[in-house]
Amino acid sequence: MEKTRSDCPISCSLDVFGDKWSLLIIRDVMLRGKVSYGQFLESEEKIATNILANRLSVLEAENILIKRVSPANRSKFIYSLTPKGIDLLPIVIEIMDWGAKYNANCPRRELGQKIKKDKAAVIKEYYQKLRGDAEQ
């Protein structure tokens, strides 16, 4: 991304992944195993198709996601996290934990319970899975 609001590291980071749709796409790939455009559209937040296409393009341009032709269906694309995208894991876990802790409308589901019990173990488990997926 060329244009930044300031040289503050938080602001620069938010310029890359800080809108809600980008974070939700990253969540879906990282924690829910979603890989295709159609799967992203099925998320409960109901992202519009034009916004999804734009955010996937931005995340790909920022080298957070990589787009490949699906080996199962050559007319479709699948998305996966790059090493740069995988490095967002602790941030996503922290945001998830913070949201569950301070918002009564966001109960801890199975993953949230695991995070509450042993956050470091969850991060380690997902790092191993994501790095394994990235090597394929």
Image (cartoon, grey):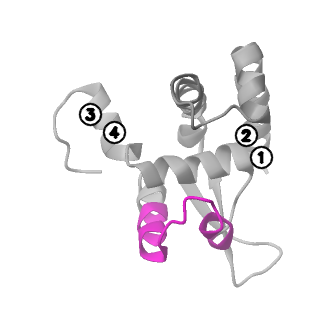
The span picked out in magenta is: 37-57
| Kind of residue at disc 2 | Leu
List the residue tagged with mark 3: 11
**Residue 81 falls inside the magenta stretch:** no
From the viewer's perspective, is 114 left or right of 87?
right
Circles 4 and 3: CB atoms closer than 8 Å: yes
| Kind of residue at disc 3 | Ser
List the residue tagged with mark 1: 133
Q: CA distance from mark 1 to mark 2?
A: 5 Å
What is the secondary structure assignment of the residue under circle 1?
helix
| Kind of residue at disc 4 | Leu
Circles 1 and 2: CB atoms closer than 8 Å: yes
Residue 64 visible, this angle = no
Circle 1 crowding by C-alpha within 10 Å: few under 14, some 14–19, many from 20: few
Q: Residue 50's x, y, as percent?
A: 42, 75
Q: Residue 22's x, y, as percent?
A: 46, 52
Q: CA distance from mark 4 to mark 2?
A: 22 Å
Residue 24 visible, this angle = yes
What is the secondary structure assignment of the residue under circle 4?
helix
